[in-house]
Amino acid sequence: MIDSHCHINFIDNGDNPQAIVDDTVRSGVGKIINIGTDLPTSFDSVNLAEKFEEVYAAVGVHPHDAKTVDEQTIEKLRELAKKKKVVAIGEIGLDYYRDLSPRKVQKEVFEKQLELAIELNLPVVIHTREAFQDTVAVVKNYASRLKGGVFHCFPGTIDDADTVFEMGLLISVGGIITFKNSKMAKVAREVPLEKVILETDAPYLTPVPFRGKPNRPALVKYVYMKLAELKNMPFDEVEKTVDRTCGKLFSLVETFGD
């Protein structure tokens, strides 16, 4: 199993990453991708990846913090992204739900980071909230040149998922699929298994039966279990397919064979 999107540095204020990683490995999760949301957390992600064999990093600036980005920020991200265990640019995108940065600025910073991903031949981890159509409109201009990517914590419909797949990207689902009457669960059930990867977004969006407590990467197994239930497939088959897809996206294919 792989947790394709989490924030170890946000769990328990980042005080004990060793315990979190140990707990994750004991649960049968072999790899964790820790995601940056701004420059400091991108540095944190790289440091965690360098410290722990099981951890890989993504570096990027979340749309909430787009207003803080200047050319120096992009240059620092470029330097970070060249580190050995950095596997993606992210999380990047658009967020109109909170609008913590002006929408025009969000789009400009999103485009700069997409260009950076193309330059460095890295996939992207995309955040979109209340902004799906605008996010797609931006990504379409870059999709043919991107080394793949994923719409994390996918918020859309089955038709929206098809739009993502047509651009050559994947969707990721997490603990929300364990919630009652989850729209995300309906999408996860219907779309092709090979187009889906799984995440926790820890410490957020904790799956049932631990909802209400801080999430952690070890709990991604409950997302795998729920997806297997939704697909009416054996757990092992779901695990193998999802892990291979995730491994290919983030260039971890040596772990899984060709």
Image: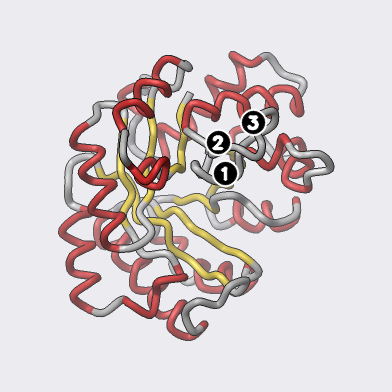
Measuring from the top left, give residue 87's x and y in whole percent. 31, 44
> Which residue type does callout 2 highlight?
Leu
Of residue 131 and residue 244, the one placed in the foreground of this image is 131
Q: Which residue is located at x 31 percent, y 76 percent? A: 69
**Picture quarter containing residue 193?**
top right
Q: CA distance from mark 1 to mark 2?
A: 5 Å
Q: Which residue is mark 2?
A: 198
Q: Are marks 2 and 3 in contact (CB under 8 Å)?
A: no
Measuring from the top left, give residue 51's x and y in whole percent. 19, 33
Measuring from the top left, give residue 234's x and y in whole percent. 68, 14
Q: Which residue is located at x 59 percent, y 37 percent? A: 213
Answer few, some or many: residues within 10 Å of disc 3's Cα (few below 14, many 20 plus, some between 14 and 19). few
Q: Which residue is mark 3?
A: 210
User: Which one is earlier in the sequence, the residue at label 2 or at label 3?
Assistant: 2
The vertical placement of 200 against 147, above or below, is: above
Q: Which residue is located at x 72 percent, y 18 percent? A: 233
Q: Which residue is mark 1?
A: 172
**What element does badge 3 sit on?**
loop
Q: CA distance from mark 2 to mark 3?
A: 17 Å
> Which residue type does callout 3 highlight?
Phe
**What element does badge 2 sit on?**
strand
**Picture quarter containing residue 254?**
top left
Closer to the eye: label 1 or 3: 3
